[in-house]
Amino acid sequence: MKPADVSTAQSDASLPVSKRLETAYAKNDAATRASDTLLINEQSRLLEAEGKRVYKFGFGQSPFPVFAPAVAALADHASDKDYLPVQGLPALRSRVSAFYSDVDGTSWEASRVVVGPGSKLLLFALMKALPEADILIPAPSWVSYAPQARMAGQRAVHLDASFETRWQATAAQLEAYCHAEPDRLKVLIYNAPGNPTGLAPTPDEQERLADVARRYGVLVLADEIYGLLHHRGGHRAFARNYPEGTVTTGGLSKWCGAGGWRLGVMHVPAALGSELFSRVLGIASETWSSVASPIQQAAITAYTRTDALDAYLQRQRVVLLEIGQWCATRLNEADIRTHAPDGGFYLFPDFEAHRQALAARGITTSAELTRRLLEEAGVALLPGSAFGCDPGQLTVRLAYVDFDGAALLQSDASVMDHEAARMVVEGIKAIVGWLQRQA
């Protein structure tokens, strides 16, 4: 080693840890920051703490109470303290298998079900368990797919969607990518009804996607966390079209109102073999070990289909349908292009028709649009750029969850005339009024 090299080595060796971290992060594009959905929730709380009124359309948390019998079961098992099997409580896996086989018409096997601390971590575990792959992610899509892919050492690839395709990636796009990259393993992220759009592909388009996936050996990761909240009960599981190549995830956070319970489930079909499944379990054993015992016991009740559970789900669908349709109609009347949702509690409005007026006031990106709406109208939204869209696209995600879900769950009155929906009504009016003032 030359003297200059010795000097350089000694200089590098003396760097403080803060500088080493800064240098390493600059070189590591897999590093990630806090989720935009969580950040907007914290920003809204801070503004409320300052005494400001905020219409909370940014954070997608179910507004409905947890299914009451599941809450009672949780209380009954509060003293359970033992570690459970890594894969999940056998009785729960059996119940989950029966539940999804029933409601979705699929064939879940209890021996191939994994219980995890939320479907979010199960999605990451699956990506991490895969060999080198391209993770194909529609844009727009949920904020965490691409960061998770990068953190797992995979290549995140966006398939750009548009208003005209109802924000769905198409079979033609999938086929074009498969043809261009024939040698790489490809994983298609399928999320329907989707976050951030509330939309799902038509049955015909879903069938075409499945045909392409089968022909090119694409693994489909079907995140169907909102499936039970399809507003007309019409969710079609992707595994019905492509059972041999679809890994499906679900959980309690959306349809059961239990996001904070952190319980998700995943089914890995036997047709995919033992290696992937064993690797997922290996990751689980080295990270979360097992989901909390009381939560798993309560989930057995949540996943037991009864008349009471069916009624609970149906009332949620009715409420979300009425609010979603009302919001989409009012936004479209203001020339904010918005597809009425198929399920869940999201809209993906497009302000393109107002680009010129907004640009005159310095608003040319979705991030600036949402910043100004929060500051000037008190409406918390997320920019389309947070979901993989071009920053210059004037789209936002609107989570229409700022209502009293408990009150609407118990009422049989008209949803939009109920006091419990007042904040949603006022929030949409605030967006429209703010936009009119920009003209």
Image (cartoon, grey):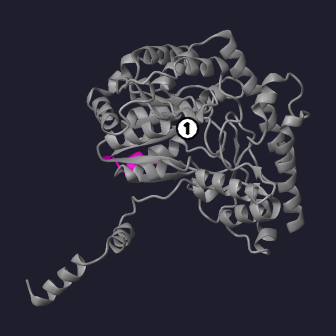
Within the image, what quadrant is residue 320 found in? top right
Image point 54% across, 26% down: which residue? 237
Image point 60% across, 20% down: which residue? 70
Q: Compared with residue 422, is residue 304 higher up or lower down, i.e. above or below?
A: above
Q: Is residue 345 left or right of residue 205?
A: right
Residue 426, horizontal then vertical, whole percent:
87, 48
Q: Nearer the viewer, residue 295 or 351?
A: 295
Residue 155 shows in the view: no
> Quadrant of the image for the C terminus?
bottom right
Magenta part of the protein: which range? 176-184
Image point 79% across, 75% down: which residue? 360
Disc 1 packing (10 Å; few <14; some 14–19; many ≥20): many
Q: Is 183 included in the stretch rendered in magenta?
A: yes
Q: Is 41 included in the stretch rendered in magenta?
A: no
Residue 147, horizontal then vertical, whole percent:
46, 53
Residue 11, horizontal then vertical, whole percent:
23, 82
Residue 4, horizontal then vertical, whole percent:
15, 89
Image point 70% across, 61% down: which residue? 394
Dot 1 corresponds to which residue? 191
